[in-house]
């Protein structure tokens, strides 16, 4: 549907309501007139297009939701050109649930992280809250990518779940990893970062400070 929104934007429907007969839209969309009518109806139902009929003619305008989605796509394309080979995330330091130190101290996790990342992680995670919708979408994409697999394991007391990790760099200086637990309690707006360093200390961070993380796209 994004391509149709861009077509409508080129027609001038971004900042004003325009007359748009389906005979005209069928040529612009390169579809039949019936399909063009269906596309506009679907866009209107999904909140991307405002439409009304005046004297038998269709008039349409893109909604704020549509403009926002187009701008996000533009930003995504620009990001692909400006940051090839990695995804940039920018978030704000937030106190976690206190479980990072417990899990990062487990030897069977540590060995796997070392084999993949080349370091034993500091016993704890740096939690970052993503506030910009662009970064939330990028984090959502990372959750769908395979990454490097961290196998779960069992002890006599309990079962420890699996995870995946991506190699990363914090503030263009400190080697790190971004971890996604299989049974994470966090939403797409939270990123868990591990590192051989105590990042709060070496970066002199406090809750609310902004941190940039480059997540490397190599598997």
Image (cartoon, helix red, strand yellow):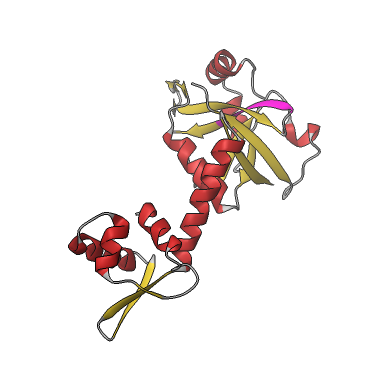
Q: Position of residue 152 (x, y in %)?
A: 44, 23
Q: Residue 51 in magenta?
A: no
- Position of residue 213 relative to residue 34, above or below, is above
In front: 64, or 171?
Answer: 64
Q: Position of residue 39 (x, y in %)?
A: 27, 61
Instruction: Place residue 103 in its image quadrant.
Output: top right
| Residue at figure coordinates x 37%, y 68% from the top left | 49
Question: Looking at the picture, does residue 27 appear above or below residue 156?
Answer: below
Type of secondary structure dominating the magenta stretch: strand
- 177 within the magenta span: yes
Instruction: Specify the quadrant that holds the N terminus.
Output: bottom left
Residue 77 image offset from top left, x and y in percent: 52, 43
Please say if 93 is above or below 64. Answer: above
**Picture mark count:** 0
Answer whether residue 90 is visible to the viewer in this image. Answer: yes
**Residue found at x 30% / y 64%:** 25
Query: Residue, x 47% and y 56% (percent of image)?
Result: 69
The part of the chain drawn in magenta is 173-178
Residue 146, above or below 68: above
């Amino acid at each position: 549907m994004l391509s149709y929104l861009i077509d409508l934007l080129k027609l001038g429907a971004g900042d004003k309501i325009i007359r748009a007969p389906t005979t005209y839209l069928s040529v612009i969309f390169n579809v039949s007139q019936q399909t063009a009518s269906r596309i506009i109806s679907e866009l209107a139902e999904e909140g991307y297009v405002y439409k009304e009929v005046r004297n038998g003619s269709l008039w349409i305008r893109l909604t704020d939701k549509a403009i926002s989605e187009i701008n996000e796509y533009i930003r995504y394309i620009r990001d692909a050109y400006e940051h090839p080979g990695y995804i940039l995330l920018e978030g704000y330091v937030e106190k976690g649930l206190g479980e990072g130190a417990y899990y990062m101290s487990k030897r069977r996790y540590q060995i796997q992280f070392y084999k993949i990342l080349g370091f034993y992680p500091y016993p704890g995670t740096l939690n970052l809250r993503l506030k910009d919708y662009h970064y939330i979408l990028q984090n959502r994409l990372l959750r769908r990518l395979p990454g490097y697999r961290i196998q779960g394991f069992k002890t006599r007391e309990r079962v420890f779940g699996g995870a995946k990790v991506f190699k990363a760099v914090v503030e263009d200086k400190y080697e790190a990893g971004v971890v996604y637990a299989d049974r994470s309690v966090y939403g797409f707006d939270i990123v868990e970062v591990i590192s051989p360093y105590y990042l709060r200390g070496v970066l002199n961070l406090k809750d609310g400070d902004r941190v940039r993380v480059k997540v490397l796209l190599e598997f």
